[in-house]
Amino acid sequence: EIQMTQSPSSVSASVGDKVTITCRASQDIKSWLAWYQQRPGKAPKLLISAASSLQSGVPSRFSGSGSGTDFTLTISSLQPEDFATYSCQQAYSFPLTFGGGTKVEIK
Amino acid sequence: QVQLVQSGAEVKKPGSSVKVSCKASGDRFSTSLITWVRQAPGQGLEWMGGLVPIYGIVKYAQRFQGRVTIIADRSTNTAYMDLSSLRSEDTAVYYCARAVLGYCDTTSCLVQNGMDVWGQGTTVTVSS
């Protein structure tokens, strides 16, 4: 089973800040990584597939990068609606596995 | 526009079973990976298993093996997740979600993509 490790587990930031979240896989997953946003009480929303491919309708301030074992999600200028929890997930092999999540909180 | 609509909240006794349904509207139900993900209160997302209806390929997470069964009724575009021997730690919100497959044949599948459509979630409470 591929382990996904996210850091940090939480981050406090202000509107307009740049935020970077990292995700590390326990083995090479090529570029088969997805990022999700989840607001309290809501289902997760897919932001990025294949490490860097932005889903339709997702604002361009979100970007993803990386390959192999190390990946990042960057929010270039944090907006009020971006305060949420972000999770990574490897889509390389079964069982599919998620990172532990990163909560982005208001500073 | 694909939508996934799940069955309603359940309250169950320890040791019993729960069956949650997930009805899909739109296309690509049979050729997609229909997965089940759960989230315990205050915890992260946990993948339980998934099914490719057209090939009947089913994959389960090791920790649920033997307790979870995932099936699909292609005639009604509905997937089901049955979890048995419930304990208090199974109290969670259970989601179904779809992932478009990168590749799949009768023996194996490559997922490659994220889960782009999610159900609304079903709260399962296990309590005596």
Image (cartoon, rainbow, N blue to C red):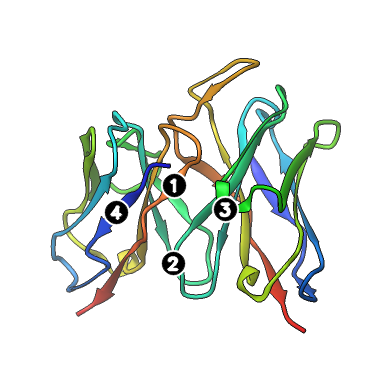
The Cα atoms of the two marked residues, 2 and 3, are separated by 27 Å
**Do badges 2 and 1 share one subunit?**
yes
Q: Chain of mark 4?
A: A
Amino acid under disc 3: Arg
Q: Are marks 2 and 1 in contact (CB under 8 Å)?
A: no
Residue A52 x %, y %: 27, 36
Q: Which mark is residue A5?
A: 4
Residue B34 x %, y %: 63, 39
Residue B1 in sight in this render: no
Q: Earlier in the sequence, mark 4 or mark 1?
A: 4
Judged from the image, the secondary structure of the residue bearing numbered disc 4 is strand
Look at 61% across and 56% down and name the residue there. B95
Q: Which residue is mark 2?
A: A39
Q: Closest to the observer: B108 or A54?
A: B108
Judged from the image, the secondary structure of the residue bearing numbered disc 3 is helix
Residue B83 x %, y %: 73, 57
Q: Which residue is mark 3?
A: B63
Q: Is B117 left, or right, of B82 in this rendering?
A: left
Q: Which mark is residue A97?
A: 1
Amino acid under disc 4: Thr
Q: Earlier in the sequence, mark 2 or mark 1?
A: 2
Look at 72% across and 40% down and name the residue there. B25
> Mark 3 against mark 4, which lies toward the viewer?
3
> Mark 1 against mark 3, which lies toward the viewer?
3
Amino acid under disc 2: Arg
